[in-house]
C-alpha cells in the first residue's frame, strides 16, 4: 500500500509492503505529518514556531515537542561546531532537523503498528525498514542535481536513513552560519547515509553548510557515509560509501 | 587525524619546495615517508603562502596511508641527507620563518621552518588543533584522502529517489514552460 501527499511543502510518500496494512494506517502517518507541519512550519501564520518568532509565546509555554526539537538543535549545533544553526537573522527555523526527526518518529509509529517492511520518503529524505516488494534491500537513487529526471547513483539500503541536502532548489537556501551573508554555492548536493533518518538529516544539513569540507566531516563521523557533488559535476565520497552502492 | 594532517602539511611543504628548486639540489629524508604522493604540486607554487592550499589531489585513487606519528609536543625534525651536487647558495635565505595560520577544520595549523646553507633543516609546529582526541595515536585515524568521480547517469530502476526537496524546482520548471508557450511569437 502506497500513498503520496503534499505536506510540509513537499511530497511525502509512505509505502508499506506488509499485506495487512490498511488505508487508515497510512492516514495515521499523514495525520502526524500534518501535526508536525502545523507546529514547525515557518510558512504557516498559526504554527507554534511562527508565534515563537513573533514573540507571542514565552518559553514556559512551549509545547513538549518544541522543547525537544530546540534542545536537539542546540545539541546538533555543538556537535557540528556551529555549522548546524537554526537561527538566521534573529528568527528560528528548525526545519533542517525537524524533517528527519519527524520521519523517524513516523517510521517508529509504523513499527509499533507491527509493520516490518516499509519506507517513508519526505522530500527526498528517506527512512527504510526491512525489504521491498521483491524481497531485497530498498534501492535508493541519488538524484542528479543538474537533471531531476536522472539518477547518478544507486544504493541498496537496509534499515537506515538517507538524506540529501542541496542548493538547486529554492534559490540556494542553505547559508553558512559562520558568514551569514554568504551563500554556500560551491557544492550542490550532499547525500548522507546514517543509522536513521534523524541522524542523517541533521548531519547532512550541517555538513552542507561546510561546503567542500562537508564530506570530510562525514568521513570522520563514525557510522556515516556521504556522497558530495560540486557545481562542476564532480563527486567526492567517503571511504565506506562503496558498500552501499548497488552494482548496475 | 589532525596530527596526520600536520604530517602531510610538513611533507607537502617539502614537495612544494622540491618543485620550486631543481631536483638534486636538495635531498631531504623526512622521518615520515608517504606511500604515494599525496599532494598536488600545482596546489600552490608560492612556497611562502604556507599551507592554505593543500587540497585533495585531482586524480586520487590513493588509499589512505597509515603513518605512525606520536602526537607529542616535540617538534618533528626533518633530517637531511647531504647531496653530492653542490647546493647553490641563495636559493633560500638562512633563517627561521613562520608559516601562515591554516584552518585544519578542528583548529589551526602553523609551522615554523629553519633554513641553513640553502637547505631546510628544521620544522616545528607553532599551532596545532586543540582537540579532546589529542591523546589518540594518529594511525588510528587515516587522513581522509577521498576518492572522486564524475557523476554519470545510471540506467537502473530504483524504488525511491533521494534529492533535495523539489516542489519549488518543479514549479519553476513548470511555470517557465507556461511562459514560453504564452509568449507572443
Image (spheres, coloured by chain):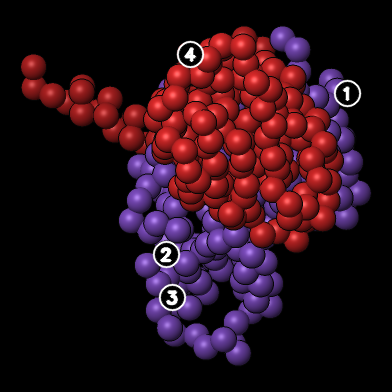
Query: Which badge, 1 or 2, comes first in the chain's sequence?
Result: 2
Query: Which badge, 3 or 2, comes first in the chain's sequence?
Result: 3
Disc 1: host chain: A
Residue tagged 3: A53
Check the rendered structure and report the hue given to chain A: purple
Nearer mark to the viewer, of 1 and 2: 2
Residue at image position (44%, 25%) is B89
Check the rendered structure and report the hue given to chain B: red
Secondary element type, mark 3: helix
Q: Residues within 10 Å of mark 3 (few under 14, many from 20)?
A: some
- Is the residue under label 1 in contact with that under label 4 (CB below 8 Å)? no
Examine the image and state in which quarter residue A101 appears.
bottom right
Q: Residues within 10 Å of mark 1 (few under 14, many from 20)?
A: few
Nearer mark to the viewer, of 4 and 2: 4
Disc 3: host chain: A
Residue closest to the eye, A83 or A149:
A83
Nearer mark to the viewer, of 4 and 3: 4
Residue tagged 2: A88
Examine the image and state in which quarter residue B145 appears.
top right
Q: Can you give x and y, in whole percent of width and height, for residue A6 in the image?
A: 53, 46
Secondary element type, mark 1: loop
Q: Can you give x and y, in whole percent of width and height, for residue A151 in the image?
A: 57, 20
- Is the residue under label 3 in contact with that under label 4 (CB below 8 Å)? no
Q: Which mark is residue B22?
A: 4
- CA distance separating discs 4 and 1: 62 Å
Q: Residues within 10 Å of mark 4 (few under 14, many from 20)?
A: few
Total labels: the figure holds 4
Residue closest to the eye, B131 or A210:
B131
Q: Can you give x and y, in whole percent of width and height, for residue A52 in the image?
A: 48, 78
Left or right of B46 on screen, residue B86? right
Amino acid at each position: 500500500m502506497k500513498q503520496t501527499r503534499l505536506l510540509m511543502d513537499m511530497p511525502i510518500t509512505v509505502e508499506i509492503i506488509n499485506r495487512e496494512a490498511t488505508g487508515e494506517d497510512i492516514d495515521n502517518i499523514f495525520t502526524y505529518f500534518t501535526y508536525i507541519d502545523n507546529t514547525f512550519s515557518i510558512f504557516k501564520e498559526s504554527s507554534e514556531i511562527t508565534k515563537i518568532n513573533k514573540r507571542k509565546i514565552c518559553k514556559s509555554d512551549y509545547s513538549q515537542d518544541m522543547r525537544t526539537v530546540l534542545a536537539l538543535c542546540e545539541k546538533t549545533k555543538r556537535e557540528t561546531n556551529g555549522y548546524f544553526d537554526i537561527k538566521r537573522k534573529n528568527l528560528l527555523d528548525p526545519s533542517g532537523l525537524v524533517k528527519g526527526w519527524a520521519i523517524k518518529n513516523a517510521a517508529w509509529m509504523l513499527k509499533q503498528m507491527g509493520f516490518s517492511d516499509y519506507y517513508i520518503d519526505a522530500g527526498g529524505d528517506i527512512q527504510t525498514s526491512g525489504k521491498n516488494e521483491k524481497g531485497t534491500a530498498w534501492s535508493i537513487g541519488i538524484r542528479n542535481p543538474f537533471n531531476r529526471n536522472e539518477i547518478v547513483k544507486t544504493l541498496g539500503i537496509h534499515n537506515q536513513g538517507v538524506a540529501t541536502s542541496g542548493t538547486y532548489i529554492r534559490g540556494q537556501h542553505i547559508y553558512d552560519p559562520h558568514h551569514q551573508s554568504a551563500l554556500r554555492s560551491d557544492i550542490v548536493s550532499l547525500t548522507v547515509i546514517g543509522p536513521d533518518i534523524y541522524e542523517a538529516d541533521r548531519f547532512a544539513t550541517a555538513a552542507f553548510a561546510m561546503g567542500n569540507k562537508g564530506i570530510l566531516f562525514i568521513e570522520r563521523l563514525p557510522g556515516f557515509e556521504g556522497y558530495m557533488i560540486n557545481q562542476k559535476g564532480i563527486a567526492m565520497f567517503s571511504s565506506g560509501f562503496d558498500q552501499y552502492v548497488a552494482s548496475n | 587525524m589532525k596530527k596526520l594532517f600536520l604530517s602531510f602539511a610538513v611533507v607537502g611543504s617539502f614537495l612544494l619546495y622540491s618543485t620550486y628548486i631543481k631536483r638534486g639540489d636538495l635531498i631531504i629524508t623526512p622521518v615520515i615517508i608517504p606511500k604515494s604522493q599525496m599532494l598536488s604540486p600545482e596546489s600552490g607554487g608560492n612556497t611562502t603562502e604556507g599551507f592554505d592550499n593543500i587540497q585533495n589531489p585531482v586524480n586520487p585513487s590513493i588509499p589512505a596511508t597509515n603513518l605512525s606519528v606520536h602526537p607529542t609536543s616535540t617538534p618533528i625534525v626533518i633530517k637531511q641527507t647531504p647531496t653530492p651536487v653542490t647546493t647553490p647558495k641563495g636559493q633560500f635565505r638562512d633563517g627561521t620563518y613562520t608559516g601562515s595560520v591554516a584552518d585544519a577544520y578542528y583548529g589551526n595549523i602553523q609551522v615554523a621552518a629553519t633554513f641553513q646553507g640553502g637547505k631546510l633543516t628544521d620544522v616545528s609546529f607553532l599551532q596545532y588543533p586543540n582537540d579532546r582526541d589529542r591523546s589518540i595515536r594518529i594511525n588510528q585515524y587515516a587522513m581522509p584522502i577521498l576518492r572522486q568521480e564524475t557523476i554519470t547517469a545510471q540506467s537502473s530502476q530504483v524504488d525511491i529517489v533521494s534529492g533535495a526537496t523539489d516542489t519549488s524546482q518543479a514549479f519553476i520548471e513548470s511555470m517557465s514552460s507556461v511562459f514560453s508557450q504564452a509568449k507572443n511569437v
